[in-house]
Amino acid sequence: MSPLTGRILHLQRLSTEDGPGIRTTVFFKGCPLRCAWCHNPESLSPRPQIQWFASRCLGCDTCLSACPDHLLRRTQAGLVIDREHCQGCGKCAEACPAGAIELLGKTVTVEELLGVLRKDRAYYDASGGGVTLSGGEPTLQADFVEALLRGLKAEGIATALDTCGLCSIDTLERLLPFTDLLLYDLKLSDPALHRQYTGSANGRILDNLRHLRQMQSRLPFRLWIRTPLIPGATATPENLAALGNYLSEALDGCVERWELCAFNNLCRDQYTRLGLEWAYAQSPLMSAAELSACEQAAKAAFRHPEIVIATGATRLVEPL
C-alpha cells in the first residue's frame, strides 16, 4: 500500500502567531472559501502553482523552452503564464538559473513531515508551544491531517488546528480527539455578507461552532475564536456586536480567547507573483484608534470582555 500523502504549501518555523509559545505552522494547500481579503492566496488552489519574481528574472527565457506544454511567453510587461492550463509540473522552476520561478505545493508523507517537525521539539518544550496546522484549510485533507495529528500526539507534541469551520461535523469529530487547541475563524455574522465576501454562506460554520459546546464536554480541546478585522467588511460595530452576542449565547464558557486580527497588506506582492488582482492592494493598515474601537465594540457585546484581545500592527502615519 502506498503511504498516505498530503499537499502542503510551506512551513513557518519559530512562529509566535498561531497559538501559544514557539510553534511550527504547517500551511496546507486548498481552501473552500474565497475571502476577498485572503492573506494566503497561494493556498487557495489545491493544485501546485508557480509564482514568478520579476526582480530575480534574468530574461534568459530558459523557462520557455523548459515548459513541456509551452504555456509561458515573454512580453514587454514580463513573463506571462497560462495559469488556466498550467499543471504545476515545476519544470520551469527547475530550469530557472536565477530562482525567479518557484513551485508552490509539495507532496509529503506523514513520516517525512513528522521528521521535520521533530527538529524544533526543544523550542516547543521550552516555550509551551507546538505544531499548528493551518492553510488554506487543513480539514480538506482530513485523512492526512488525522494521521499527522495522531503522530504528533504520540510523541507528546502539542497540537493546534486552524480552521475556517467549513467542513463536516464528522471531520471535526475525527480530528479534535488529537487536537489540543482549536483556532476557529469567525468572520461575519450576516449570511448574505458572508457569501458576498467569502463566496459561501455561513450556516455550516455556525452549526459546527454550536456543536463544539457538546464536543468540549467529551474532549479536552481549548477553543480560540479568531476574527480578521477587514475595513468595511468585518471591522464594523454592527458585525462585531453581532458576533459578540452570538458567542455569548452559543458558546458561553467555552471560549478561552477571542482574537481580533488587524488587517495587514503584507501579501500584496504575493498576489502580483501569482498574476492576481487584490481588492485590498491599496488599503492601508488600521490606525491604533480604529483597532481600539473594534476591540471596544467586541468587548461591549461579549459576555466575557476580559478574553477579547486585539492583535496586529497599526499604521504609524495617516495616509495622504
Image (spheres, rainbow, N blue to C red):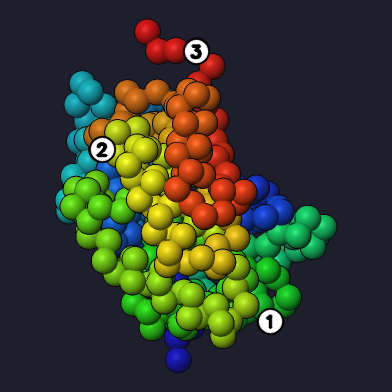
Q: For residue 220, what is the image quadrant?
A: bottom right
Residue 266 in sight from this viewpoint: no
Give the residue type that dot 3 points to.
Answer: Val
Q: Which residue is mark 3?
A: 317
Helix, strand or loop status at disc 3? loop
Q: Label for residue 154?
A: 1
* Relative to 127, 166 lies left or right: left
- The mark that comes first in sequence, 1 or 2, is 1
**Above or below: residue 315 compared with residue 234:** above
3D distance between C-alphas at marks 1 and 2: 41 Å
Residue at image coords 20%, 21%: 76
Helix, strand or loop status at disc 1? helix
Residue at image coords 63%, 63%: 131
Give the residue type that dot 1 points to.
Answer: Ala
Give the residue type that dot 2 points to.
Answer: Leu
**Above or below: residue 165 compared with residue 17:** below
Mark 1 is surrounded, within 10 Å at the Cα level, by few (under 14), some (14 to 19) or many (20 or more) other residues, namely: few
Helix, strand or loop status at disc 2? loop
Q: For residue 163, what is the image quadrant?
A: bottom left
